[in-house]
Amino acid sequence: MIDHLTQPDSQILIKANKVNKIFPNGCHALKDVSLDIQRGEVVVIIGPSGSGKSTFLRTLNQLESISSGNILLDQVDLTDKRTDINAVRTEVGMVFQSFNLFPHKTALGNVMLAPMKVLNQSKEEAKQGARDLLYRVGLADRMNNYPSRLSGGQQQRVAIARSLAMKPKALLFDEPTSALDPEMVGEVLDVMKELAREGMTMVVVTHEMGFAREVADRVVFMEEGELVLEETPERFFHSEHPRLQRFLGQVL
């Protein structure tokens, strides 16, 4: 467990400071959200639908622009107009609810593509790296399968391998199991647990409370665009905070 009282700034990988997001329709989706994420830390974000969880997650690699505040990745200000956002995005992997795999490419081909196109790896280098990653996520026997021949859980594991192929500093997960049948959820969470054990920095929006209890260094509760509470799992799930208690009463 990471002790936030003793960590120097150099250990902060992602720093969000008073982030606001107001959509053109006037919806104030994020209200002064501030959060530091340490290297090697797993932060789980929970909250009701419409609370701003996914919007906040998407600001961390600027898939969603912000209205005010700032976000630093490894001390680089993502909101600075001089920052090359495309370069930053190669350092922050994102795993979505939907798998977004290319249907005309095999599992191996999907994982090879970005390293070849973005990192300029040779075909052989990208192929070996992709094979290693698919083995790592338990898909050594599915490398040559097209997405249509893979289960939802297998497709999501390919998506995780594809993100890892870019050698990211952090991985963002936006409800990665919400589109899966219940029997497939465990296989994806097992891969995420292994990544956590290996020290990958992860920010996870999820409704999987068991994962939050078991794996998170900190759990964050958001509601109505506000960061209401952040605590260690032990303290979080024993908190008497009324807004959190109301939410947990609905989902547990």
Image (cartoon, rainbow, N blue to C red):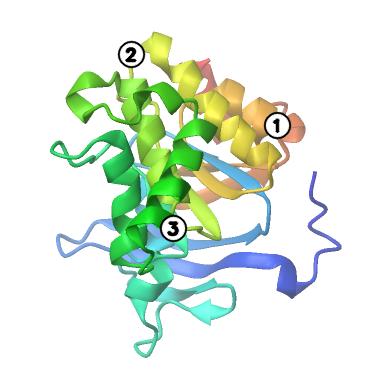
Q: Earlier in the sequence, mark 3 or mark 2?
A: 3
What type is the residue that disc 3 sits on?
Met
**Residue visible at 33% across and 64% down?**
21
To which quarter of the image does residue 20 belong?
A: bottom left
**Disc 1 versus disc 3: distance between alpha carbons?**
38 Å
Q: Earlier in the sequence, mark 1 or mark 2?
A: 2
| Percent coordinates x, y for residue 121 in the rendering | 38, 64
What type is the residue that disc 1 sits on?
Ser
Q: Would you call the spot at circle 3 few (<14 residues within 10 Å), some (14-19), or many (20 or more)?
A: many
What type is the residue that disc 2 sits on?
Asp
- Residue pointed to by mark 1: 239
Above or below: residue 226 compared with residue 245? below
Q: Nearer the viewer, residue 128 or 215?
A: 128
Residue with the most extreme front position: 124
Question: Which element carries disc 3, helix, strand or loop?
Answer: loop
**Residue visible at 39% across and 26% down?**
177
Q: Nearer the viewer, residue 239 or 130?
A: 130
| Percent coordinates x, y for residue 162 in the rendering | 38, 46
Q: Count the numbered circles shown.
A: 3
**Disc 1 versus disc 2: distance between alpha carbons?**
31 Å
Q: Are marks 1 and 3 in contact (CB under 8 Å)?
A: no
- Residue pointed to by mark 2: 181
Q: Earlier in the sequence, mark 1 or mark 3?
A: 3
- Residue pointed to by mark 3: 166
| Percent coordinates x, y for residue 170 in the rendering | 54, 56
